[in-house]
Structure formats: structure tokens, C-alpha cells
Image: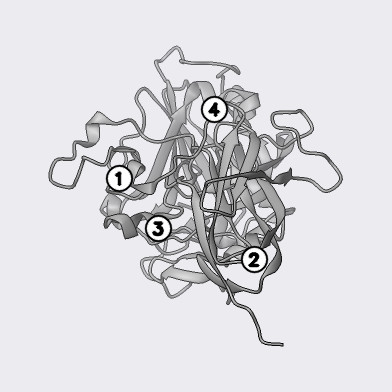
Amino acid sequence: MPGIKGPSDYSQEPPRHPSLQINSKVPFNAEPPRSALASSYVTPVDLFYKRNHGPIPVVDDIERYCVDICGLIGTPKKLYMRDVRMLPKYNVTATLQCAGNRRTAMSKTRKVRGVGWDVSAIGNAVWGGAKLADLLELIGIPKLTCSTQSGGKHVEFVSIDKCKEENGGPYKASIPLSQATNPEADVLLAYEMNGEPLNRDHGYPLRVIVPGVIGARSVKWLDSINIIAEECQGFFMQKDYKMFPPSVDWDNINWSTRRPQMDFPVQSVICSLEDVQSIKPGKVTISGYAVSGGGRGIERVDVSIDGGKTWLEASRSQKTGVPYIADHVSSDKWAWVLFEVTVDIPYSTEIVAKAVDSAANVQPENVQDIWNLRGILNTSWHRVQVRVGHSNM
């Protein structure tokens, strides 16, 4: 494509923060220390998890870069960055979470395939850009449209990014047209992250943000937007990121029996303590994040310091100085909450966190019950072991 290219090797990778835990060097996949997540409602760009399927694209002429809009529409169109910037700009605070977040813990129960992620394949950012609904209206697709006159029912996003799973072809994904044309769904063509232009790792110069949905649908380095009749037939829609029961393995899997995963379930993680941590007896502040997909707020975060026998309710917060109320107009509906509770821990124990969203969905107790061969959507109770040591005076 003019103005941008997907390299064939990894010689032009951008610099990354030294504190990132690298889970795969090629392609580059990394996450920040968990403690960094609980310290800031908006995740710094350098500490936002990096999820890639190939070499990072390189922009050589931003003026020539454009996105092709085609498919089941009247007249194909080329969209340049100056066209995107002429549309009304919106800032949407939204949490992105890789479907494989907490995969490593699931793999300890029974081996799964995929990049090993701890608990930090997630981040919260303020995304700036144009609403997809506004763009589609410009090409003749009204807001709140389920189907075009030509039979278009889905919007496919195709990346510059080339990946081996597509046999060297581009990464792609789709969402329903009804979601794409709904202004309240806040689907963005984003060119900013936390008030700055996107950096290369996060999709410069233009990416899609689909709030409340697994990160795999928020396509980076946008190449084209296609209006199509059926959902995208790409690898990551049809042969990955689908939720199977524990009884399915690689010998009996039938990918066509499950729909592509979209919304992510309710999730919470303790970030102030590692999986196994030694502490001194006394007061301990337990903090972390909780989030749910589909715009559902977090109604409650429960913390147990006795392995789940008894529970305390943690405080929840988003923006400084604004009390958090789940699903209230003052809250960021696509974003996580940070939780905190201070407890007295006199002896070694297991600390557990679980969240409840505004639809009363709750995290499953055991990872075994939701084990799946790709290790996605591990939303089981998050557990950490603390070992209390008594220092000699």
C-alpha cells in the first residue's frame, strides 16, 4: 500500500520499555509488571501490553497513506488521514484485553497452545479518533443499520500486518454492521492514544478500537474496510479465539461449531501481590483491576483472605474525584475499575479476588471448569499465596 509497508523481517522493530516481560521475541509479545497496572487508571503507552503477529509495519509517507473502503457499497472510496481528521473527534476511554490474558495459569492445569501470558495482557487507554458510524454514514450507510441494500451485514477490517497464520496474508477481523453503525458502541478509527499519536506498536497511523470486545477485533495498521455479507473468514475469526468446552481437544475439534468470541467476560486480578509473595504480618493493601465486556460495569469486587471462606468488599474507582457507580453516565462504561482493600494478615494464607458485573455475572471459581485447548478467557477467581514471616527483634 502507498505510504506504509509490512516488513518481511524484524530489523526495523521499535524500541520498547525495559521493564516489559517478553513472552515472545519474534513476533514481539510482551506485558508489563502487574504492579504497574494498579498504579494508574490510564495505562502509560510504554507499559501497555504488546500483541503482535508479525513485523511492525513502517510508515514511509503519511501523506500517501490511505484506507480502501470497498465491498457491498455503491462506490469504493479511499480514505486519507486528512479525511479521518475532518470527521468529529471523540475520546473514548476503553480497556483492551487479549483473549489469552492469564493463559499461563490455565496451562498449569492442562497444557494449552498459545503465547504464555501472565495477568497483564490488558491495559486501559484514552483513544482518540473518528467514530466508524460517522465514516460509514459518509459512504451512504445510515446509523443503526443492520443490513445494506446490497446485503452487507458485517464490517471487515484488514491490516497491513502480514502473519504466518494467514499464510503470509494480512491479519483481519470483522464486527456486525449493526455494531459498527451504532454511535453508542463507540467503535473508533483511532489515531491517538493517551493524547499522543499512536506509536508503531499500537497501530500507527490508524487502527480500529472496538470497546468491550476481545483485543483481537481491534485491528491495527488499517489497510482496508470491507462491507461484507458474512462474517470475516480469516484465521483469527474462524480457527482461533473461540470458546470450547474442556472435553474438546486437538483430535476432535470442529471449529465451525462455535462462533467467534466477541465480548470478554467479567474479570479481576490482584496486582499488588505476586502469585507467591513473602510479607510481614500486619496491614496489607490489596489492589488490582476488574473489568467486564459489552459495556457492563463492575457492581462489586470481593476479596477473601482465607481462601474463599469469607469475603470483604473492596472499594472501586476510575477517575480521581468522581465516585464510581456501575453503569452510571459519569463512569467510563468501556473501562476497567481499580479496586482496593486494606486487611490485617497475621499468618500465611491464600488471598482471592472475584468480581461481579452489572448483569450479575460472576467469575467461575475454578480454572478447571473453563479450561479450553487455546487457553482463552481465563476468568477464574484470581488467587495469590502469601507467606508471612516474623522478623526477629
In the image, residue 69 sits, relative to residue 15, either above or below, namely above
- What amino acid type is highlighted by mark number 1? Asn
Where residue 60 appears, as percent x and y from the top left, is 55, 63
Amino acid type at image mark 2: Pro
Does residue 112 sit above or below 372 in this rendering? below
Give SS at disc 3.
helix
Q: Which residue is mark 3?
A: 105
**Mark pair 3, 2: CA separation:** 27 Å
Disc 3 marks a residue whose amino acid type is Ala
Residue at the image point whose x is 54% and y is 27% from the top: 180
Residue 328: x and y in percent read 75, 28
Picture disc at residue 372:
1
Q: Nearer the viewer, residue 99 or 57?
A: 99
Could you say which quadrant of the image residue 35 lies in?
bottom right
Q: CA distance from mark 1 to mark 4?
A: 30 Å
Identify the mark nearer the N-term, 2 or 1.
2
Label 1: which secondary element: loop
Q: Which residue is depicted at the point 50% across and 65% down? A: 275
Total residue callouts = 4
Return the mark for residue 180.
Answer: 4
